[in-house]
């Protein structure tokens, strides 16, 4: 059950820490209720539904609070080692990609919650309405609006194939600017998340040529410290450049790279299984 709650929490907040806190708090509340005599009527008839409700509401509180907090530069969802993802992700793993979680960030909190509970967990509209304390027609509207936006202006990039990632890495590591540009879409973009805690670009790098130049120069500074890692159900790259650890994830459109997301905020890199030589010293 905890795995299901973690899946809900991660989809709703985009951070594993918030998902864990919400799931564990919900479970602790249920245990506390269980210690009360059943005659009091406090114990829920359907523990799973009760836990889903509490976790969802706790996550919405965390999401709204985080959206009010100051953050330096771009904010990206926290990358998570694929092995940590809940089992419920086996058939629906695509919506745990960073590209999708980032698209979710552009939805309103209630739209996001309604869509996740409906699409990822197939809950009835009536149950979602109870969880979100809204009317069923309103919930249907939230889900429909979210689905429409994710299919149009918020449509996330596709999963990049290992072949495409290999093509990009080969071009970048060889310093071939033209080959790097050829692997990118015209509107390619590099987004870096550091919260100002390490040296990283605070503004997006936009356009194929600027993106290619940035990646080639970054590779030169990496001194060969680059390796594949399995993150969020897809291949990512761990890079060390000038002593700064980064996780790079790639999104594609029509067989070319359109987004490169660099996670550099050290607070968000604690749940990735790094290869030997990339792990920071204790």
Image: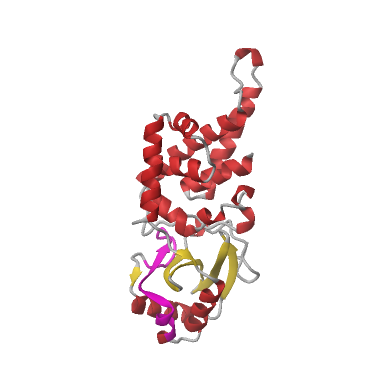
In the picture, measured across the screen, residue 211 lies left or right of residue 8, that is left
> Which residue is depicted at the point 52% across and 74% down?
165
Which quarter of the rendered picture does the N terminus lie within?
Answer: top right
For the question of whether residue 167 can be seen, the reply is yes
In the picture, measured across the screen, residue 24 lies left or right of residue 216, that is right
> Which residue is depicted at the point 56% across and 63% down?
234
Q: Quadrant of residue 20?
A: top right
Q: Is residue 43 above or below residue 89?
A: above
Q: Quadrant of residue 213?
A: bottom left
User: Residue 181 appears at what percent x and percent y?
Assistant: 40, 81
User: Residue 13 appears at what percent x and percent y?
Assistant: 47, 46
Tell me, yes or no, whether the highlighted magenta stretch contains residue 161. Answer: no
Q: Residue furthest toward the top?
A: 39
Question: What residue span does the magenta drawing correspond to?
Answer: 179-201
Q: Is residue 81 above or below residue 240?
A: above
Q: Is residue 77 above or below residue 28?
A: below
Between 281 and 144, the residue placed more toward the observer is 144
User: Residue 91 appears at what percent x and percent y?
Assistant: 60, 52
In the picture, measured across the screen, residue 269 lies left or right of residue 253, that is right
For the question of whether residue 108 can be seen, the reply is no
> Which residue is depicted at the point 43% across and 77% down?
215
Tell me, yes or no, whether the highlighted magenta stretch contains residue 180. Answer: yes
């Amino acid at each position: 059950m905890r795995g299901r709650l973690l899946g809900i929490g991660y989809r709703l907040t985009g951070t594993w820490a918030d998902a864990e806190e919400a799931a564990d708090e919900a479970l602790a509340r249920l245990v506390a209720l269980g210690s009360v005599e059943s005659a009091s009527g406090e114990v829920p008839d359907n523990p799973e539904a009760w836990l889903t409700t509490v976790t969802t509401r706790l996550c919405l509180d965390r999401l709204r609070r985080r959206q009010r907090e100051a953050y330096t530069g771009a904010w990206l969802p926290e990358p998570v080692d694929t092995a940590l993802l809940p089992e419920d992700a086996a058939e629906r793993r695509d919506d745990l990609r960073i590209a999708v979680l980032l698209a979710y960030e552009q939805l309103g909190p209630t739209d996001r919650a309604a869509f996740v509970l409906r699409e990822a967990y197939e809950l009835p509209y009536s149950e979602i309405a109870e969880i979100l304390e809204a009317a069923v027609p309103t919930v249907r509207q939230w889900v429909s609006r979210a689905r429409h936006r994710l299919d149009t202006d918020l449509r996330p990039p596709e999963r990049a194939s290992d072949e495409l990632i290999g093509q990009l890495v080969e071009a970048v590591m060889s310093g071939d600017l033209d080959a790097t540009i050829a692997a990118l879409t015209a509107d390619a973009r590099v987004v870096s998340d550091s919260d100002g805690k390490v040296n990283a670009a605070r503004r997006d790098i936009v356009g194929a040529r600027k993106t290619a130049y940035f990646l080639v120069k970054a590779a030169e500074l990496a001194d060969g410290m680059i390796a594949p890692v399995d993150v969020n159900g897809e291949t990512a790259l761990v890079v060390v450049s000038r002593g700064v650890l980064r996780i790079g994830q790639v999104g594609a459109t029509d067989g070319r790279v359109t987004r490169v997301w660099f996670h550099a905020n050290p607070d968000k890199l604690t749940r990735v299984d790094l290869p030997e030589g990339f792990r920071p010293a204790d």
